């Protein structure tokens, strides 16, 4: 069973059709890429997946469960977590604190216990701190762990954004343009991080414009244009696909059917 | 910035111990007037700390004084009309505001920023109307007189000690909350609410709790004040008092634990000092307040940060200049 | 009785609107809650008082002087104080509170605590549909309405007005379009305070002048702005009328004391269902 299944999703905003009958499957453990020219509907699809928007019609299944239209934090609880293009961070908290906040143990917060210093609560929080540190190390941020998030350079900030998403313990991580605005070195690093996340068994769905990255690391690629899926397959299949090439280059004389 | 990783019980240090000793010994040397100022300061500290809890989530409550008032009225009425002992009145004085706050929050937690501020102001105005005009219950503008003392105490000193003890307890609980996951999450909500939500923080629940806990302590403080002062009127709990609480929090610096404490202490003593300068006191207070907020927008506690940003240049921690493949150590 | 309530409500609504629109304007453009707004109202009345009673100048000239002075004061305050608090709502509010305290003290010192009156502008009563109103109040309401209409035209159709709207919607974007945000904010502040000043001089002959006279108008303005939505001028106008009617209704049928509490209660209730007010942004 696919970990993510999108079936016939259509999204209309007033008269504009942002997504039309989009369907795709992502298998557990895969690294899938979602590409398409600007305005193709990639962000809208992400919004639908993460619960930010409700589709006009169609369904989204996550681990076999229908999550269409669920609230974002419930979807996040279920294990589908996404990052945002405009990096959202806890600006005035340290890097480690940023990750720690997201290190939730599913059990309910025991505030009274925390105040009184109950051993069970203290141990839980120690574990959370260790987990946070582990993720900070994984993301290569241990040298800046006490730095305020707002003081980090851009590349570090995006990495931190991924780290925070990772800390929530997702089964499917949806990365929204993770390498946009990064230089070669930073991109290299992010690719490494994505690989390591994948090695931990987490499924990844990636929206990105940087073709070499997408072609280089993804197992499978889905191509959108004008809100419709126009191709799906392995990187080399996609690279040779005429429709895909046309959608990026465009053919002025062709009229839409 | 919080050191959320520090799990110490209470970081007092030598200054703390000396200060504590000073406070304990004070009644032996200070006259009633000075004890009175300290009593007010202690109560103000608890109010400021209580308000700060919700404040950090970017919901500024303009009705914190209402909880103080409710505490005072509840405790007085229970003691006088029903003859309940102080202990029970005291507890009820905290619980009633806490429950009311929780219920109110259920209705208005969705309301953001400025609107929450104004809505809480509205709540304060409505309750203020009630305090002023429901004469049979609250005594109206004349208020309630002859509130029974705590355990028959008639001198100032025992009240000083019980209020000092209460304040110490409040500071302790607030400190533990501040250092707990709950406290860290409250700060996170204030920083980036949507990110906190998607990272699994139950924003709504946290806000209700922060509001209710603040109200709880304000109610307790209100009870203590009422029995100490033996008379309360609605004029004590007017809009200006709630503004003062806000001032203590903001001028003190809401983002460090001891900020509101500093704010309450400095501003209360300053106001008292001004009282001796007669007619110009309001103007001086206003002038200093304006200068303070312009020079220290992050409050006294944020002064080092403010200064660093104005005059210094930020230094990154050494070694972290490049993000390179070598730092991948796994 | 109904026409009387309606007429009272309309007149009251106009007065409140002058205050509320200014408050909403300041918040919309600068994200500052101007707690000192009542003091501009008050100072205008005080200035008018001194000019009329000490210098014997006519009401109209005194009003114009007061308006200009207060508008200038507002503009100056933005340049000196409020510009650094743009977007910092809490800190800006504290600054405004400080100014409010300071202004009240100054007024106390130069004017004294005893309320004083200003002679009426015109005398006589007017009857409309069985409702009676002093000619003075009707005149004031008329002036207020005219000014508000002029403001509406100004914001909708002049270049400066459009710049203001642009800044309100997105200050950064406005900056990139070459709009001098600093200039727009300062002028907006001046306009808003001038509106409050107008309310102050208009109301001075009706009620009396004293240092704390700004508190009630400020409170009403806050209720209205909660109800109408911060930053929405139209919302402030409509909400002013609603509150004006509500106050008139409650004041006539129940009691004036309860009127304000009920007004607040109404605003809170509406906010629970529409968390951003009737037409709020943000």
Image (cartoon, rainbow, N blue to C red):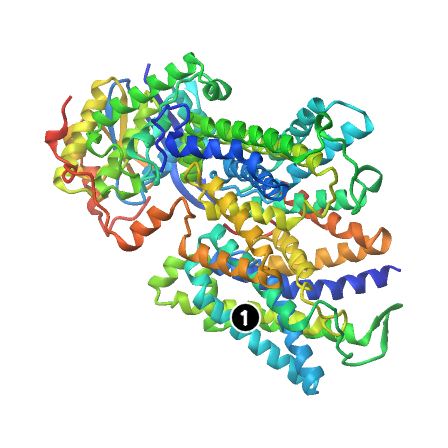
Q: Residue at x 22, y 47 (%)?
A: A250
Q: How many marks?
A: 1
| Residue lying at 52% horizontally and 72% vertically, measured from the top left | C73
Residue B68 vertical placement versus C125 (above, below): above
Q: Classify the position of the N terminus of chain C by image quarter.
A: bottom right
- Say which of C175 and B165 sits in front: B165
Q: Is residue B23 left or right of residue C62?
A: left
Q: How crowded is the residue under tag 1: few (<14 C-alpha within 10 Å), some, or many (20+)?
A: many
Q: Position of residue C65 (x, y in %)?
A: 60, 81
Disc 1 designates what residue? C191
Describe residue C14's horizontal placement relative to residue C164 as left or right.
right
Q: Is residue C106 above or below residue B292?
A: below
The structure residue drawn at horizontal position 68% and vertical position 27%, both measured from the top left corner, is B90
Subunit of mark 1? C
Residue C273 appears in the picture as rendered: no
Vertical arrangement, residue B111 with respect to residue C50, above or below: above
């Amino acid at each position: 069973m696919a970990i993510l299944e999108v079936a016939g999703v259509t999204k209309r905003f007033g008269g504009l059709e942002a997504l039309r009958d989009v369907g795709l499957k992502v298998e557990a453990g895969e690294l899938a890429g979602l590409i398409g020219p600007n305005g193709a509907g990639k962000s809208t699809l992400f919004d639908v997946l993460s619960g930010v928007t409700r589709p006009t019609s169609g369904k989204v299944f996550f681990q076999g469960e229908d999550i269409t239209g669920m609230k974002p934090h419930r979807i996040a609880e279920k294990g589908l977590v996404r990052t945002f293009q405009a990096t959202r961070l806890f600006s005035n908290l340290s890097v480690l604190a940023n990750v720690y906040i997201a290190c939730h143990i599913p059990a309910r917060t025991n505030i009274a216990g925390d105040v009184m210093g109950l051993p069970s609560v203290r141990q839980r929080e120690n574990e959370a701190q260790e987990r946070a540190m582990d993720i900070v190390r994984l993301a290569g941020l241990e040298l800046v762990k006490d730095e305020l998030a707002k003081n980090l350079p851009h590349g570090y900030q995006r990495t931190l954004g991924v780290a925070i998403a990772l800390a929530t313990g997702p089964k499917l991580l949806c990365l929204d343009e993770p390498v946009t605005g990064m230089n070669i070195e930073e991109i290299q690093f992010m690719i490494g991080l994505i690989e390591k996340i994948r090695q931990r068994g987490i499924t990844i769905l990636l929206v990105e414009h940087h073709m070499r990255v997408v072609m280089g690391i993804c197992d499978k690629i889905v191509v959108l244009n004008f809100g419709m899926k126009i191709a799906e397959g392995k990187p080399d299949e996609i690279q040779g696909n005429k429709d895909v090439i046309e959608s990026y280059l465009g053919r002025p004389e062709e009229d839409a059917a | 910035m919080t050191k959320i990783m520090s799990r110490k019980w209470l970081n007092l240090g030598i200054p703390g111990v000396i200060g504590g000793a000073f406070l304990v010994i004070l009644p032996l040397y200070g006259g009633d007037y000075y004890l009175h100022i300290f009593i007010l300061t202690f109560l103000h500290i608890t109010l400021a700390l209580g308000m700060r809890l919700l404040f950090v989530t970017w919901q500024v409550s303009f009705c914190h004084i209402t909880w103080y008032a409710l505490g005072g009225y509840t405790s007085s009425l229970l003691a006088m009309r029903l003859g309940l002992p102080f202990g029970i009145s005291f507890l009820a004085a905290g619980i009633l505001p806490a429950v009311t706050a929780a219920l109110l929050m259920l209705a208005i937690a969705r309301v953001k920023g400025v609107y929450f501020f104004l809505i809480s102001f509205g709540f304060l105005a409505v309750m203020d109307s009630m305090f002023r005009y429901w004469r049979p219950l609250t005594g109206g503008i004349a208020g309630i007189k002859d509130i029974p003392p705590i355990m028959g105490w008639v001198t100032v000193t025992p009240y000083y000690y019980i209020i000092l003890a209460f304040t110490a307890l409040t500071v302790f609980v607030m400190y533990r909350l501040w250092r707990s996951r709950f406290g860290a999450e409250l700060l996170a909500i204030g920083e980036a609410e949507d990110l906190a939500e998607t990272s699994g923080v139950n924003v709504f629940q946290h806000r209700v709790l922060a509001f209710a806990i603040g109200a709880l302590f304000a109610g307790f403080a209100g009870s203590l004040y009422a029995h100490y002062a033996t008379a309360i009127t609605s004029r004590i709990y007017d809009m200006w008092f709630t503004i003062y609480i806000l001032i203590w929090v903001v001028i003190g610096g809401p983002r460090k634990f001891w900020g509101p404490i500093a704010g309450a202490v400095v501003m209360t003593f300053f106001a008292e000092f001004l009282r001796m300068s007669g007619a110009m006191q309001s103007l001086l207070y206003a002038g200093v307040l304006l200068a303070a907020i312009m020079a220290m927008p992050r409050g006294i506690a944020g002064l080092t940060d403010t200064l660093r940003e104005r005059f210094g240049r930020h230094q990154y921690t050494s070694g972290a200049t490049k993000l390179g493949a070598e730092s991948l150590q796994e | 009785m109904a026409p009387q309530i309606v007429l009272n409500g309309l007149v009251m609504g106009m007065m409140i609107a002058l205050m509320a629109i200014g408050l909403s304007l300041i918040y919309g453009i600068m994200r500052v809650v101007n707690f000192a707004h009542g003091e501009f109202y008050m100072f205008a009345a005080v200035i008018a008082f001194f000019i009329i009673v000490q210098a014997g100048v006519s009401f109209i000239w005194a009003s114009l002087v007061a308006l200009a002075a207060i508008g200038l004061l507002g503009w100056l305050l933005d340049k000196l104080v409020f510009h650094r608090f743009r977007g910092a709502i809490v800190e800006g509010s504290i600054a405004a509170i400080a100014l409010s305290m300071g202004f009240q003290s100054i007024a106390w010192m130069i004017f004294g605590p005893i309320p004083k009156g200003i002679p009426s502008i015109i005398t006589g009563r007017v009857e409309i549909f069985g409702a009676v109103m002093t000619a003075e109040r009707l005149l004031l309401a008329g002036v207020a309405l005219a000014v508000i209409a002029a403001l509406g035209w100004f914001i909708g159709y002049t270049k400066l007005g459009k710049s203001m709207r642009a800044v309100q919607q997105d200050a950064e974007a406005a900056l990139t379009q070459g709009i001098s945000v600093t200039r727009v904010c300062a002028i907006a502040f001046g306009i808003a305070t001038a509106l409050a000043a107008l309310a102050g001089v208009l109301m001075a002959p009706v009620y009396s002048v004293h240092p704390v006279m700004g508190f009630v108008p400020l409170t009403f303005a806050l209720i209205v702005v909660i109800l109408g939505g911060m930053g929405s001028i139209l919302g402030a106008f409509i909400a002013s009328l609603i509150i004006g009617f509500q106050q008139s209704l409650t004041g006539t049928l129940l009691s004036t004391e309860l009127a304000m509490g009920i007004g607040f209660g109404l605003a809170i209730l509406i906010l629970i269902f529409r968390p951003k007010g009737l037409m709020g942004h943000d």
